[in-house]
Image (cartoon, rainbow, N blue to C red):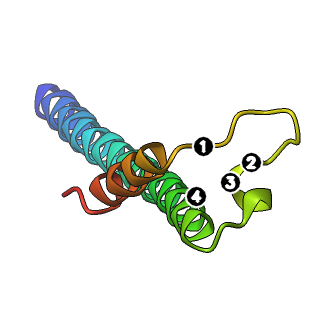
Amino acid sequence: MLRKVSDFLNVIRLNAAKNFFIGIFQMRTRAATQVQTYNQIAIALGGIVTLIGLVVMIAWHFHLTALVQLLPGAAPMRYNTALTFLLSGLAITNRK
């Protein structure tokens, strides 16, 4: 009788250990997919910032006031600000 109880307890311990390690693995993979998602969001936003900077720089070269100044009463985006947007967006999208 005692052998059966000890075997039963060993099985419970092994199952608990197995479930513990499976749980840790699942938490790590969940955290890894969250980091992957955040990296994809950062790359997408960096691409948007790069695109805004590039569009405004092109608008400055071709004197397109509609793209440099979005609202009629608003101040236009300066060329150096557009350059900063471009470089910042490139830095965000190319990070490792």
Kind of element beneath mark 2: loop
CA separation, marks 2 and 1? Answer: 7 Å
Q: Residue 91 sits in which quadrant?
A: bottom left
**Residue named by callout 2:** 69
Residue that badge 3 annotates: 68
State the residue position of label 1: 77
- Pinpoint residue 12: horizontal percent, then vertical percent: 26, 34
Q: Secondary structure at mark 3?
A: helix
Q: Residue 9 versus residue 64: which sits nearer the camera? A: 64
The residue shown at (39%, 53%) is: 83
Image check: 75 left or right of 95? right
Q: Relative to the observer, which residue lies in front, 61 or 93?
A: 61
Disc 1 vs disc 3: Cβ atoms closer than 8 Å?
Answer: yes
* Inter-mark Cα distance, 4 to 3: 10 Å
Q: Amino acid at mark 4?
A: Ile
Instruction: Please name the residue that numbered disc 4 is placed on.
Output: 52
The residue that appears at 45% across and 54% down in the rendered structure is 46
Q: Which one is earlier in the sequence, the residue at label 1 or at label 4?
A: 4
Q: Secondary structure at mark 4?
A: helix
Reading the chain from its start, which is encountered first: label 1 or label 3?
3
Q: CA distance from mark 2 to mark 4?
A: 12 Å
Image x and y of residue 6, in percent: 13, 29
Looking at numbered disc 3 in the image, what kind of residue is underneath it?
A: Val
Are the residues flagged by discs 2 and 3 in contact, CB closer than 8 Å? yes
